[in-house]
């Protein structure tokens, strides 16, 4: 049973990025959109991100977006859309909820316990080639994560020509709507770090580097 | 000339040079009620981090930015930061957004912290004798209708931002702003009256995701004397905006 659950989780992580957070087998007409399970235990990201943070972030914020999205799409044609399509449609009223649902799933998947370290696999070569070195890439990504003003996200994304880009987005915004393929994301809304780091976002970003899931990043590169 | 005289002359020269080159810099206000003064509605921890980390951070970063701006555009130096915020276009583009962010952060937090007062045995809302009580009744119908509208406006703020009661060219009104954007950017004739900080840092320590509880508590802490003062000043268009030396907010 545990094996099957683990396999299902692994499969979900390796699906192409736009299929993250598909409607699970448990979706119903009342709840067309579901909250995917966390890929790991809530305490598994410690000491970098505490169990308490994951508890609030996942159960209150992420689940909150899913619940509100279900409430607003219930009994409408929007309930038939995929989450990915709702994000691309950018309809006022549903975009924030859909995008935040999508973004948070991508965020949990961008991290893994005992992750971090330098990039490995194909992405390591791309980073080296396009940024000069991993440390230059890390410096640039960190600067953007720390420098982002207000709520938002910082992404490693890939454009249509295959070039990697570091992208900042405000609030719920997501690089999908610019035709980019997200590879990794770091949540820089204050709720992502306030319990553990208070105002010290640089410390949180430092900690995030210990959790980066390079397998997931490589899977996004390969996906559709 | 003896050494003492020489030293006095040197000191005088240094003083004159210093006065001639001191740039406008802003100070972090003290909280009139201390860090425990708003408990239990607003915790000591919340106030300490909000004031000593966030507000202090904006103060220090604004001051550093202003030195850069004054070097770039010396003519702006005599202008109070609120005048710069009223017309950010006068600041060169390379510093403009930073000025809005940091200047706004500094001023907005002044309004927020000055707009709070310990809960006494007072009833929530402005005392009926205050002009602001009458103006609120005139514009919104009643205090509770004002409160309802203010909460509704607050619920529209997604991400980081503020809700404002402000004086808009002759009338009280409610508006919201993103990030550290301020009421001043809405154009001439606008004056902040009360500010509610809806950035997560304002409530996360005490309330986590429960923004509504924070907003509820805030209404009990509002300093209506401060609001009354702001309204009075707005109405008479006192030139505190031109008086850099006044620690008006």
Image (spheres, coloured by chain):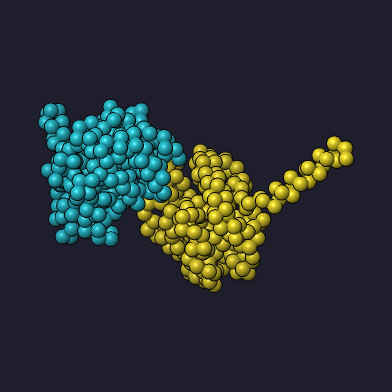
Q: Is residue B157 left or right of residue A165?
A: right
Please state the total of marks drawn on the protein image: 0
**Residue found 15% across the figure and 40% down from its top:** A222
Residue A217 in the image: x percent, y percent?
Answer: 22, 38
| A27 and A172: which is toward the camera | A172
Q: Is residue B16 left or right of residue B157?
A: right
| B149 and A139: which is toward the camera | A139
* View extreme (right): residue: B1
**Residue found 52% across the figure and 63% down from its top:** B90
Q: Can residue A65 be seen from the camera position used here? A: no
**Chain identity for the colour cyan used in the image:** A
Residue B214 in the image: x percent, y percent?
Answer: 45, 48
Q: Can residue A96 be seen from the camera position used here? A: yes
Q: Is residue A127 above or below residue A99?
A: above
Picture quadrant where residue B191 is located: bottom right
**Residue found 44% across the figure and 59% down from its top:** B177
| B191 and A111: which is toward the camera | A111
Picture quadrant where residue B223 is located: bottom right
| B139 and A47: which is toward the camera | A47
Q: Is residue A147 left or right of residue A105?
A: right
**Residue found 14% across the figure and 28% down from its top:** A2
Q: Is residue B137 above or below residue B53?
A: below
Q: Is residue A16 above or below residue A84?
A: above
- Quarter containing the N terminus of chain A: top left
Colour seen for chain B: yellow
Picture quadrant where residue A51 is located: top left
Residue A94 in the image: x percent, y percent?
Answer: 25, 57
Residue B76 in the image: x percent, y percent?
Answer: 58, 59
* View extreme (front): residue: B1
């Amino acid at each position: 049973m545990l094996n099957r659950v683990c396999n299902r989780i692994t499969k979900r992580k390796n699906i192409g990025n736009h299929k993250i957070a598909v409607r699970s087998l448990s979706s119903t007409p009342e709840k067309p959109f579901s909250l995917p399970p966390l890929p790991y235990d809530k305490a598994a990201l410690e000491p970098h991100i505490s169990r308490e943070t994951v508890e609030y972030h996942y159960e209150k914020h992420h689940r909150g977006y899913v619940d509100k999205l279900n409430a607003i799409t219930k009994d409408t044609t929007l309930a038939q859309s995929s989450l990915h399509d709702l994000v691309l449609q950018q309809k006022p009223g549903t975009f924030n909820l859909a995008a935040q649902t999508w973004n948070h799933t991508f965020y949990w998947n961008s991290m893994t316990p005992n992750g971090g370290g330098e990039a490995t696999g194909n992405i390591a070569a791309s980073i080296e080639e396009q940024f000069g070195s991993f440390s230059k890439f890390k410096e640039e990504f960190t600067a953007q994560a720390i420098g982002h003003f207000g709520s938002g996200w910082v992404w490693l994304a890939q454009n249509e020509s295959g070039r990697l880009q570091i992208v900042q987005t405000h609030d719920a915004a997501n690089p999908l709507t610019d035709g980019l393929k997200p590879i990794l994301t770091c949540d820089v809304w204050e709720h992502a770090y306030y319990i553990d780091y208070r105002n010290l976002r640089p410390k949180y970003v430092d900690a995030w580097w210990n959790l980066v899931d390079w397998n997931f990043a490589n899977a996004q590169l390969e996906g559709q | 000339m003896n050494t003492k005289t020489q030293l006095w002359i040197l000191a005088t020269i240094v003083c004159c040079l210093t006065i001639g080159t001191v740039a406008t810099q802003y100070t972090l206000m003290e909280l009139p009620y201390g860090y425990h003064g708003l408990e239990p509605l607003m915790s000591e921890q919340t106030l300490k981090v909000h004031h000593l980390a966030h507000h202090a951070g904006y103060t220090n970063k604004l001051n550093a930015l202003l030195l850069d701006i004054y070097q770039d555009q010396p003519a702006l130096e005599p202008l109070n930061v609120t005048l710069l915020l009223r017309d950010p276009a006068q600041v060169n583009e390379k510093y403009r957004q930073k000025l809005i962010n940091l200047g706004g952060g500094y001023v907005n937090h002044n309004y927020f912290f000055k707009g709070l007062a310990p809960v006494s045995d007072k009833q929530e809302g402005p005392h009926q004798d205050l002009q602001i009580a009458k103006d609120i009744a005139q514009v919104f119908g009643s205090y509770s209708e004002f409160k309802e509208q203010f909460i509704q406006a607050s619920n529209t703020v997604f991400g980081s931002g503020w809700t404002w009661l402000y004086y808009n060219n002759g009338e009280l009104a409610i508006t919201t702003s993103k990030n550290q954007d301020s009421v001043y950017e809405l154009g001439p004739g606008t004056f902040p009256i009360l500010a509610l900080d809806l950035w997560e840092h304002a409530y996360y320590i005490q309330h986590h995701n429960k923004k509504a509880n924070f907003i509820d508590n805030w209404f009990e802490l509002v300093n209506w004397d401060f609001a009354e003062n702001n309204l009075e000043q707005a109405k008479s268009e006192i030139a505190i905006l031109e008086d850099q030396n006044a620690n008006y907010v």
